[in-house]
Each structure stands twice: as C-alpha cells, then as structure tokens.
Amino acid sequence: MSLWWARREQLDKYQLNLIENLPLRQNHLVLGPPGSGKSNVLLRRAQFVRGQEMPNVLVMTFTRPLTEFVKTGCLDAQGREIFPPNCVTTLESWLRSLYARHRHDLPGEQANLQEWKKQLATGALVFREESHFPLYDALFVDEAQDLLPEEIEVLKQWTPVLFFAGDDRQRIFASADGLEAVRHGVPGLREHVLPFHYRLAPQICRMADRILVAGTGRSLESTSHYEGPRPGRICANGPLTQQQQLERAAARLREQIRVYGDLIRQGDRLGVVVAWKDHREAVLEYFEADPELRGRSKIIRARKVDEDAYDPCFDRDTPICVLTVQGCKGLEFRALHWLFCEELSQHHNDEHYYTVVTRAKTSLDLYYTSGLPEALARAWAPTGEDLW
Amino acid sequence: MSSEFLVAVVDDNELSDLLAGHRTRYGRRFSPGAAEVAFVPAGCTGVVFRQWSEPIEPVQPLVLIAPEEAFRRLCGRFAQLRSDLSPLTAWCHLVTPERFQSVNSLTHDAELRGSQAAWAGLVVAEAVLLSDRPLANLRISACLATQGFAIARATALWGSVSMSDLIDRFDAASRMFRGLRGSQRTPTRAAQVRAALQPIWACVAAATLGAPVAGCIDLQPVVDGLRALEHARSVKYAEEAESLANPLLRIVPEASELAVVSKLAPEGRLRFFDFLMQRLRSSEERDGPRRCALALLAGYTATIAAGGAPSLSLVESSTSRWPEITAWAYVVGGIGERVTWTSSFDGLGRLVSREMMRPLRFDEPPTCDCALDEALLLADPELKDPLVHLRIKQARVATVALMPGVNVAFGIGELVAQEGVRPESTQREAEAATAGRGGHDILAALADAVWPYLRQRVEDWATSARGREWEFRANRDKRRPGPQPRLPLDPKP
C-alpha cells in the first residue's frame, strides 16, 4: 500500500473534479488545508494531462525532500511507474537546468538564500527569447505560496498552462509574497478549494487551529476526515538538556518504530526536526550510537553540487528522517519530534509553527531546553494535570 | 438430453454393472435423506448415479454409500478385480450412510456461521508460521495444505468433527505423500506450531458451532471472549476490548487492563503488549487456558496497537517462541468480518475463504486425486513407487480427500526433500548413479547435498517473471530454425 492515493476510489469528489474535469488549457490554483491532498491532486492532474496528448509536463516543488516525497507517489501500490519520476524536480534545479541548456553561468553565490533565488530567477528571464527549446505543455508547481514574483515570471514564459497548489498558512520563506504573488502574476487564474483533509488526528488539528485559522475559514478539526491511528497525542518534553532531549526522543522512536511497524512498511515515516543544519548531524550521530536505532535514520536534505555520495531519496529501511524546519515543508510523518524547538524562535513566525505542527499525522513531541516558544505554548497545554 | 439422479442399494454384482455404466432396474429418483441409504445392509452398497434420458448413454455413478468398515473391502475388491476403475474415489464420492443422511441436497453447502474470515486468518497464520515466509511471498497452495484448512473445511461441511481423528488422518496422508516414514516424527517446527494451534482450532471451532470446547472445558472463557468480541463488532459497540476482556478475567486478571489500553495512544498500547509478553515468559504453564488467554490478549493488542490499526510486525519477533500470538492476531482481525472477498492477507484471505466455503457437489465427480481411506489401502510401501496404484497424474502434488470434500494438497516427496531424507528407492538410485561414476564425483555429491536447500528458491525463481522470461527465451531458441539436421536414414556422407 502506498500513502499516495493512486486509485480513483480513494479520492473524494472534489479531488476527482480537479484532476479530471478542469479545462486543460487554463491556469488553476488549488487551495486546501494540510493533508487535503493538494500534492496528490497536483501529481494525478499532471498524470491526467500527460494522457491528453500533452506529455511535455514538469512537476516542481520547492525543496529536495518534497521532490523525493512526491517521487514516491509516481509508483502505484504494486510498484509500477504511473508518472515519470524524472519529470518531478525542484524549482531551483529546473532554473539551474535553464542556465545549463542555454550555456549561461549561474549567478554568484550570496549569503542570503532568498536574494540568490531572486537573482537566479531574474537571470533566467532572458533565456526564452533566445531559446530553441519548445514550451512545456503544462507546468505544475506545489507549495506555490513560497514563489517569488520573478519565479512566476519565468514559469509563465515557459508554458501556456500553469497549475499551482498551495496554502498561505504553510509559507516558510518570509520574503515571498504568498499566493497573492501568484494571483497577481498569473492572469485568468481559476481558484479551487479542497474543503476536507484526511491526515491530521483531531489533537493535532486543535493545536494547529490555535496557531492559525485554516484557509478554508473553517477549523481543521471541523473539516477533518482522519481515519488513522487513534488517539493522537501531543507531548511537550522539558525543560531538558539537549542530551536529555536526545535520550527521550530516542526512547520514543524505539517504541514508535515497533508500534508503527506495519504502517512504516506501507510508507509511513517518523520525522525529527531541528532548527540548525549542524544539529542534523549531531542527532544522526546520536541515533547511530543506539543499537536499536542504528541504520534506521537518515538526514533528508538537498544534494550539494558535485556530491555523489549522498542520495536524497526516501528509503523504507531508514524510516526516521532528520531534517530542518525548512526541509520538512510539504512532508508528512506518522510521528514528529521537534528537538530544541526554541532554537531560532526569533526567526520563526506563525506560519513556520503551523507548518511544522501539521507535518505530524498522529503523534507530536516537542522538546525544549528552557521553555516552549510562545506560539506553541499558546496552542497546547497538557490536560488533567494536578494544579497544586 | 436431460438427466435425472437416481439412488439404489445394490449387491456386489449389481454394483460392478453400475460402476461399469450399465443401467439397473432398482433405481429410484433421489431425494435428500433418502430412506434407501439410511441403512445399507452388509454386503450391499448405496449408489447415487446420473441417468440420461438417452438409453444408449451409460449411467454415471457419483456417490457410493457404505459403512466405514466396508470401505476397505469395496476399494480392495475393485483394485483387484476391476483395476481399470480403481481408485474409485478419483471419480466417485465415497461416504458413510450417517454422513449422507445429513446432506440436504446433492449440492452440500459449507457453513461457518460468519466466522470464515477468522478461519481464513488462522489458515494463513499457520502457513506463515510453517513456511517462515512473509505474507507477500506466500502461495495459496501453502495455505490449502495446512491442518487448519482441513479443520476449517471439515467444520464448514460437516459441523462438529473429531479434531484428533482429522489430525491423525492429516498425518497419515502427510506420511504417505510427503514421504515421511513411519518411524519419523513430524518435523519439529510443524509439531511446535501444531501444539500451539490446537487450542486455537478448538476454540474457534467451538465459537463457530456454538458448542462447548471439545476436550478442554477450561478454554470456555476464551470461546466466550471470542463470541463477545464477535457480538460487539456486529453491533458496532465502541468498547469491544472490554467485551473481549470480561469473560477472560476468570483465568487472566490482567485482561482488566484491556479496557483502559484501548483508550491509550499507540505508544501506551505497546507498553501493555510488552507487559503481556513479560507475563507469558514468566508464566510457569507451558500449556493450558491461561497461556492461551494471554496469547489471545497479546494477539488482540497487536491488532489495535497502532491506534486501531494493526501492528503485526510486533508479533513477528516472538513468532518462533510464541506462534500462537501470531495465530490469534490473524484470527482476531477476522472476527465479525463478514466481507471476505477483500484483499486481506495480501489477497490470500479471499482465496482461502473461497475454498473453505466451496459447496461440495455430489452431482459432479470429486475434485481430489483420491480419498485417504482408499489411498491407505492401495499404497504399498514395499514397492519401488509406493503410490503406483493411486495413478497420481500430477507432477508434484496429490490432492487427497481426508473426508468427503475436505481436500488437502500434499507435495509428493516434499518432506523428504525438506528433511534431507530420501526414500529408499531414490537413495538406491542415487547410490547406483554414484557407483556408476566411480564414487569420485564430488560435485555431484555436493549438488545432492545442497539441493534440499536450493529447491524452494529454484522453484520460486522458475515461477517468477524472470524465470518465465528465461523459459520463454530458452523455448524460443529451441524453436529457432537452424541448419537442417541429417535425417537418420540419410546415407552417410
């Protein structure tokens, strides 16, 4: 069984309508809360469009982890390829490929990632006029809330048909204008809303609802059709030293690897989120020293230029994914552990908290050294504890 | 051309005529529970046969009805005098008057009163435990060759049956066809699995039939628990764990925790599972109702451990020591489940269920190679091929009716290969071959030694897509036209 909905009967009528019934030559934007199936609809729509004599399509995401996650949906439950995995890429990889194909040098590296992305897109705007390459039949972009206006301009140059999926509440990059940039940048855009979601346990929904109001205007809890393991659980662990946090997380993961064993075989994963990139290595090292967790964890990140040894693919034998807040965008985990969660809190906004919390499907553990960040503390409290 | 089904009680000479297709003047139209076959006198045989409206067509005997003690004489007589008709049970059903009395029609329905999903789970569990393979690699043939399948099928067709008798018959067939010789005991793993599953078969059978547990009244709380769980699920009662636990409290006080556990998050349920495992390990009883009930609780907990979703991987680590936990987990998952045609157990569940519930058609010839009673009579261990008189025409498998309609497939010579023990004839052949090579062919001896370990892999590969492709290519190459060979009668150049 795959976590992706590959069979028609697994989709609701709203999702089916977006996949099969929308006009082929229009631009569309699909909105929906976390777990509503936006990425699934995007991929199945791309698959549908390819079958309508429009084979030259590309599915783009923002991060390498999300690209690898979407690629896992390119196979059906029997492992047969239903959409070419090589037609799924990151937006940055695609922009880089434009430079390479048109024999232009990449812009110089900058300390500010957003500035560099802006330069990369701006530089790519000149290629279309001089290009001998055909237009794409359609381009599909997930997590469109993080698009820069310059990136939207490049996308528009290369296809007459754009299909976006996004949710402003899950915006990670502060410099992006969110979906407003898409609405302004793409004329004639038709918007569609997926009203229901299927991924989040009610406990997680309630916490997320206290951080942000979902884009549908209704609470996540009221639109939930969750059918997974019950009850969900949220636990704040602290104050603890970093070593103690690691110990507790490892103990929980040892249990979760066992109790979710069947779901893990079906493609579920356990997530460990940290703020700093350096912390990923430290966490992985700690887990590797644990006899029961050894060989079961993997850092999920982008592959560096000329780095052959690292394979960013998701692997069922290593169900524990260690990644950063940015890296977890668009992904989902049966159980999520946010270690040292007050780190970088000065840079985190409500969208960040909302995004991380809604990556957990059933179980969420927050670990802190001194205190929970305000947004998280306001969103959840243990119940039934003795006041005195 | 129309036909009708007739019944007659005939003596030996008339039986010979009937079996040869000749008409008889004693036939009367068959009706269920026919008085003619309620009591078959000594020396006589009841026969149900099909008679066509066209007189030139032979009558077709379909069922022979005789007391059990007469089977041996009947089959032996035809093996000696009319060997062209032997074995009789390859083309004709053989039943006792008592059994045939319970048949309401020539199409005898199987009935498991809604517990076929639980039985299917039990059968699949046994196959998993015996083969030591993951579910995805398990074949339906392995499931249909289990003792559990025989018991489930016998219960479905004939209601309350003697489990020990059925197991004895299974063992007899196993020895005969799989190649285990009389002095050899059942292989250790199979014996361990059987010992673990016997109480479960008894409990599930009792729960199915609504009868007391045969042979062990102490297991009654387990049966009551299963029935309560079935009822809770049928009425969609939210606290099903409590329903299961209450009857078990008499023998396992720890069951009281189950009602609380079902409200816990998966991590908490895991801790209860570990607690039960610890209790099982510390339990002094090797057998008995407490161990059985603890295993049921552990199996049930595994099915709800992941917050209502099963976590069967939990029981995998304890499979070798506690096979009953795996079996209970597979059983519990099917209790109360009426829809059996889903892809449960990787699609095996519906196939097992289909074969368990297949009606027994007395208006058609049997689908087995022979019945066990006749096979026991005709097999001769002194012969080079002990099964020669059975005329088995399948390459590797014999389908044997342990009871009417209870067909179990046995791999011919399977255990010989598995155990590395060869029947004397094969051994003699191998010795002769070795002698022919002067006894110096070390590679051949090595090949013989490792073959039992390779056999399953080779067979799996041969049935895999790659194997079939290889075979296709090999055949294609054979068919490829080459230079015209010289004909045998051509003059030599």
Image (tube, rainbow, N blue to C red):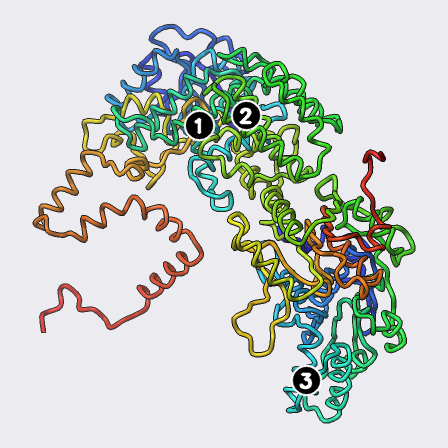
**How would you rate the neighbour count of disc 2 (Cα within 10 Å): few for under 14, some for 14-19, many for 20 or more?**
some
Label 3 resides on the chain identified as A
Nearer the observer: mark 1 or 2; the answer is 2
In this picture, residue B247 sits left or right of residue B180: right
Label 1 resides on the chain identified as B
**Residue B307 visible within the image:** yes
* Amino acid type for the residue under numbered disc 2: Arg
Number of numbered labels in the structure image: 3
Give the Cα distance between marks 1 and 2.
29 Å
| Residue B88 location, quadrant | top left
**How would you rate the neighbour count of disc 3 (Cα within 10 Å): few for under 14, some for 14-19, many for 20 or more?**
some
Q: What element carries label 3?
A: helix
Picture coordinates of residue B453 (x, y %)? 31, 45
Q: Earlier in the sequence, mark 1 or mark 2?
A: 1
**How would you rate the neighbour count of disc 1 (Cα within 10 Å): few for under 14, some for 14-19, many for 20 or more?**
many
In this picture, residue B444 sits left or right of residue A371: left
State the residue in front, A182 or B182.
Answer: A182
Residue in the image at 53% along x and 47% along y = A292
Share a chain, discs 1 and 3? no
Cβ atoms at labels 1 and 2 below 8 Å apart = no
User: Which mark identifies residue A98?
Assistant: 3
State the residue in front, B43 or A19.
Answer: A19
Label 2 resides on the chain identified as B
User: Which mark identifies residue B147?
Assistant: 1
Give the Cα distance between marks 3 and 2.
65 Å
Cβ atoms at labels 1 and 3 below 8 Å apart = no
Q: In this view, does A59 lie above or below A69?
A: below
Picture coordinates of residue B10 (x, y %)? 38, 12
